[in-house]
Amino acid sequence: MSRSPRQQGPLSLPWLPPALVAILSLGSIAPLLLGPLPATHDGLHHLFRLFELDRSLRAGVLYPRIFADMGFGYGYPVLNFYSPLSYYLAWLA
């Protein structure tokens, strides 16, 4: 017994569910995209780390293991303990 392939009618919209999810999620992420930096308990630490990553990348170090100006000038191995992907994505933005 063979089945016939499913016929797609003119009202078949496979892109509609992902589009609805994307449109509805814009309302929840709009404050993050439009407003100032959110006030969190560690927001400034991430900003300082992003600044140090920028300085290291401009100096030619693609994967800095130690941020030289952190830790009271002695350096701190931030990327040894934390995943660098989020910092690289923030640096690209």
Image: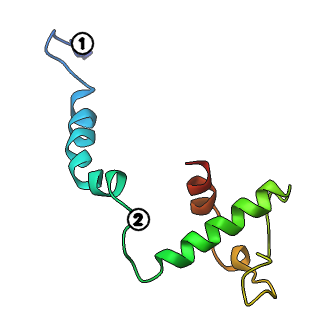
Which residue is at 80% across, 77% downward?
Answer: 68
**Residue 78 numbered mark, or none:** none
Q: Residues within 10 Å of mark 2 (few under 14, many from 20)?
A: few
- Mark 2–mark 1 Cα distance, whole angstroms, equals 55 Å
Query: Which residue is the extreme one toward the top?
Result: 10
Which residue is at 48% across, 80% downward?
Answer: 42
Which residue is at 19% across, 44% downward?
Answer: 24
Label 1 is placed on what type of residue? Ser
**Residue 14 against residue 87 in the figure, above or below:** above
**Residue 27 against residue 59 in the figure, above or below:** above
The earlier-in-sequence mark between 2 and 1 is: 1
Q: Quadrant of residue 52?
A: bottom right
- Determine which residue is flagged by label 1: 4
Quadrant in which the N terminus is drawn: top left
The reply to whether the C-beta atoms of the residues labelled 2 and 1 are less than 8 Å apart is no
- Determine which residue is flagged by label 2: 37
